[in-house]
Amino acid sequence: MDYSGAIDWLFNMRRFGPVRTLFPMRELVERLDHPEVAFRSVHITGTNGKGSTSAFAASILRAQGYSVGLYTSPHLERFTERIVVDGVEIPEAEVARIASRLCPIVEEMAARGGERPLFFDVVTAMAFVYFAERRVDVAVLEVGMGGRLDATNIVTPLVSAITNVSLEHTQVLGNTVLEIAGEKAGIVKPSVPLVTATPDDSVYSLLAETCRKLGSEITRVGTDVTYDGISSNLDGQRFTVKGLRGTYTLSTTLLGPHQQRNAATAVAVAEVLAVRGMEVSSDAIVRGVREAKWPGRMEVVQREPLVVLDCAKDAEAARALAEAVRLLPHGRLIAVVSISADKNIRKMVGHLAKVADSFVVTSHSVMGRAADRRHIGAEIERQGKPWVEVERVGDAVERALAGAGKGDMVLVTGSVFAVGEARRRWSGNP
């Protein structure tokens, strides 16, 4: 199949099955001669910040001179963003070739009547095959959802990381923070150290007990590893991290205090890797954090009026975003929002309404996922803020820009999908 055919094949797969199980993924990699054992790995989950932390960790390892695979999800604009080696996205031709190899295996498994591999199983297997073929030294793997039954959880990494835990995907992962923490703790392997940045003491206690039972050391960002801000502007921020091996003065183009925490988590991961035998110098940590890129996260794409794109997709992310936005220079703030239907819309709007003067409510184009615009609008009205409804994301952005003065700010947020659609205006991607 060609690239277009491969993408159609992938996105016509089921996203969720009747039961959650790793059996299809285990059979897939067995049929592929276990590509996941051909490279060392770092395994990262969390409710928020796992993508940024993965990007920081991969950048640090690249700065040390390793060949590094990076597997993340979902993508902003292109499917190929999900699978990256040494900063370069997988070529479309490679997607087509590996999909063609996987297709008969997947169809044969389905024809047998057993559990058919799901979309994320197949894409994860594609990443493993590509990383093995490229002979990467190490792969940084971001969990798709949860941890215990995520397709990535067939690896035995050198180090695991859980950034934080809050309510998400409650229909799948559990109705309480501790239930969800238990799912995420499922990535911890015997004798494999864990790094976590959770500020929640009850979550930390659960993770620490899991590590005790498995003989795994645990490092907590916020106590064992600390960080402090120095300065920030629209070009980036400077901060210090006091790690396990020393203190680093760091800079990053990623904005927001939460990115200091994510960078500190990646630094802790790098230091634990060094303890486990990988060479990771202080210079690599400094350069890796400085050179890390993670688009769509407090990303400034225009200065006058100021336009910021951020993929805040749940209540906790919206809270962190609102705090970060307060630090940016702006007059009126117009928020362009599209939120997926399974999110806590009331809480998300509540956080955003603390900083937004008005809203343009729109719908991202991922079929069946976007919340009803009138439902979002009703929550905005509860907050006493004005709003207008525009069907398409691109048109909504233009509406906000037309209403913004030179010193004002347009914030596009609420969904990775919405930010990806909006970003095309500035990235030039069709």
Image (tube, grey):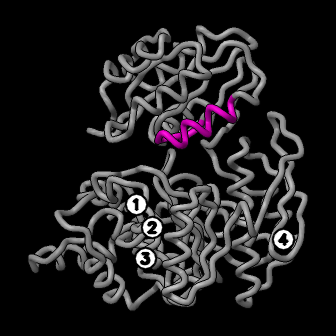
Q: Secondary structure at mark 1?
A: helix
Few, some or many residues within 10 Å of mark 3 (<14, 14–19, 20+):
many
**What residue is disc 1 on?**
180
Lower sequence index among marks 3 and 2 = 3
Q: Which residues are magenta?
A: 310-325
Label 3, label 4: how many angstroms apart (C-alpha)? 28 Å
Residue pointed to by mark 2: 184
Along the horizontal axis of the image, is 230 left or right of 108?
Answer: right
- CB-based contact (under 8 Å), mark 3 and mark 4: no
Question: Residue 151 location, x and y as percent?
Answer: 38, 72
Q: Label 3: state its secondary structure.
A: helix
Q: Which numbered tag is attached to residue 259?
A: none
The secondary structure that most of the magenta stretch takes on is helix
What's the amino acid at mark 3? Asn
Note whether 256 is above or below 75 in the view shown.
above
For this rendering, which residue is in front, 84 or 96?
84
The disc, 4 or 2, on the residue closer to the chain's N-terminal end is 2
Measure the alpha-carbon separation of dots 4 and 2.
29 Å
Above/below status of 378 relative to 219 = above
Q: Residue at x 35, y 71 (%)?
A: 149
Task: Kindly identify which residue carries mark 3.
Answer: 153
Q: Position of residue 198 (x, y in %)?
A: 59, 59
Residue 398 placement: quadrant: top right
**Badge 1, how many Cα within 10 Å: few under 14, some, many 20+?**
many
